[in-house]
Image (cartoon, helix red, strand yellow):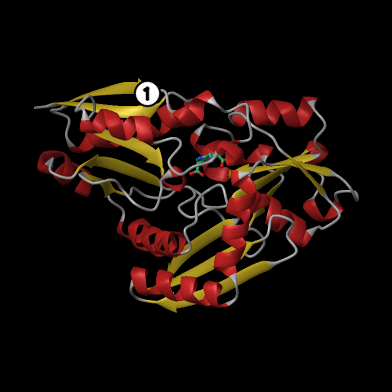
Amino acid sequence: MRKIVIGSRKSQLALTQTDWVIEKLKEIAPQNEYEVKKIVTKGDQILDVTLSKVGGKGLFVKEIEQAMYDKEIDMAVHSMKDMPAETPEGLTIGCIPIREDHRDAYIANDNVAFRDLPEGAIVGTSSLRRAAQVLAARPDLKIKSIRGNIDTRLRKLKEEDFDAIVLATAGLKRMGWSDDVITEYLEPEVCVPAVGQGALAIECREDDQEIRDLMDTLNHAYTHRTVMAERTFLDLLNGGCQVPIGGYAYLEGDDIILTAMVGTPDGKTILKEEVRGQDPYEVGREAADKIKARGGAEIIEAVREELDQ
Ligand SMILES: NCc1[nH]cc(CCC(=O)O)c1CC(=O)O
């Protein structure tokens, strides 16, 4: 028996995800005691400004990782897509549990279909990846930044000047919202999701073998393999959730099929490549090579320079 302290951001979604993990752990190892420790991250403190501007990788994870070094916590549950490609020295992603829905959700007032939105309609999102792909499909639409947790964003859709919003389906589902609130699912053919969207990353100290053994039982091989392909692509393009980059992989038999995307924020250029293969790192690298050969790295670099100003 061991008391296991699990770090979580204090947002409702983060706590829900952490509770979901604890429920699973209790089934596997009921002899342990589990405790949640809420940690305020830099990202939580500045949710009212445009996040992509304050940017920087790992805005939601740094303080949590420090608590792990300090042994205040033994593990931490993160949204995979908020995790920088590289894990710091001494820590590791101990497991990747089964992925929730990977798709972006489009939610419109009066359920107006995406193709029926009137010219100039306002779509709320603070994600350059979503903005790029919405504008690529509908160059006539306007993008307006929207911040806050899911409830806040749904309220702003009703009360403020928005016709529709786009957000992660996984967050909605984990928070218990029914499919009914979603007007349309944006399939990866239309909107390539963020790398790791819908997946969790459970981080722990590399040398804590007891915790690592416990986590092995929560790992989902399919999710792990596909997310690794996505993250290899992200890493090689020096990507992150603040630049317009996406990646989604699934398995067909034993093959990994990865769709990788880099776009300009105005949606005028969208580079997309599909790569098939067996090894997640090879697949991710091949996708990165192909996107780079078409100027993808320069697009990311230009967006970063713009954000840094
Ligand atoms: N960027 C913030 C964030 N990080 C994880 C989720 C939702 C859950 C997920 O995508 O796995 C969200 C909200 C959103 O993008 O709408």
Question: What type is the residue that disc 1 sits on?
Answer: Ile
For the residue pair 146 and 164, the one nearer the viewer reads as 146
Tell me what residue is drawn at x 24 percent, y 27 percent: 73
Image location (x, y in percent) of residue 194? 53, 53
Query: On the rendered image, what quadrant is the N terminus found in?
Result: top left
Tell me what residue is drawn at x 51 percent, y 61 percent: 247
Q: Can residue 192 be seen in this view?
A: no
Look at the picture and state if 34 lies above or below 61: above
- The crowd level at tag 1 (other Cα within 10 Å; few <14, some 14-19, many 20+) is some
Q: Is residue 135 left or right of residue 235?
A: right
Helix, strand or loop at label 1? It is strand
Q: In this view, does 216 lie to the left or right of 209?
A: right
Image location (x, y in percent) of residue 177? 58, 33
Q: Is residue 291 visible?
A: yes
**Label 1 CB sits under 8 Å from any ligand 1 atom:** no
Image location (x, y in percent) of residue 9? 41, 28
Image location (x, y in percent) of residue 253? 39, 74
Look at the picture and state if 246 lies above or below 27: below
For the residue pair 189 and 229, the one nearer the viewer reads as 229
For the residue pair 252 and 224, the one nearer the viewer reads as 224
Q: In this view, does 226 lie to the left or right of 260?
A: left
Furthest residue in direction left, as rendered = 1
Counting the numbered discs, the total is 1
Tell me what residue is drawn at x 76 percent, y 56 percent: 135
Query: On the rendered image, what quadrant is the C terminus found in?
Result: top right
Furthest residue in direction front, as rendered = 309
Tell me what residue is drawn at x 60 percent, y 70 percent: 272
Q: Mark 1 points at which residue?
A: 39
